[in-house]
Amino acid sequence: MIDPLILGFFGGALTLGFLVAAAFFLKFWRRSRDPLFLTFAVAFVLLAANQAAPVIFNIPREDQSTVYLLRLAGFALIILAILRKNLQKP
């Protein structure tokens, strides 16, 4: 069994990484106003929430909780944004 303190530390580090990625996408969105970047920023915020929630709410196994739906929503947003961008008429 892994120490909960270590799990909390790595969960926090991953959350911070996702939030940094979201900040970069927001920066790109502010410059270009391309909805792809805004969608990516929202998706990375959802992924950050997915990493933080098990630590905050003391959920032992995230794969058996509803928190996993945040990850699903984040990846679905990324897929939909890419499809929307690629299917746009020039």
Image (spheres, rainbow, N blue to C red):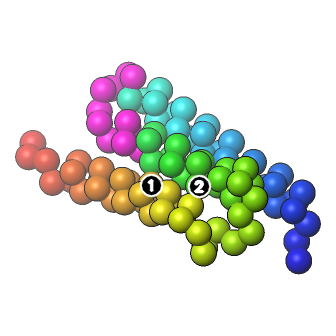
Where in the figure is residue 34, as x and y percent of width and height? 29, 33
Magenta span covers which residues? Answer: 30-40
Q: Which mark is residue 43?
A: none
Magenta residue check for 31: yes
Residue type, label 1: Gly
Name the residue rendered at 30%, 50% in the picture. Answer: 81
14 is higher (above) or lower (below) than 19: below
Count neighbours of disc 2 (C-alpha within 10 A) and say few if under 14, some if 14 to 19, many if 20 or more.
many
Measured Cα–Cα span from mark 1 to mark 2: 9 Å
Residue 47 in magenta stretch: no
Q: Which residue is mark 1?
A: 74
The answer to whether one can see residue 30 in this image is: yes
- Apparent side of residue 44 relative to residue 15 in the rendered image (left or right): left
Residue 14 visible? The answer is no
Q: Give the number of the disc on residue 50.
A: 2
- Residue 88, given in percent of the width and then of the height, sits at 13, 47
Of all residues shown, which one is farthest toward the left? Answer: 89
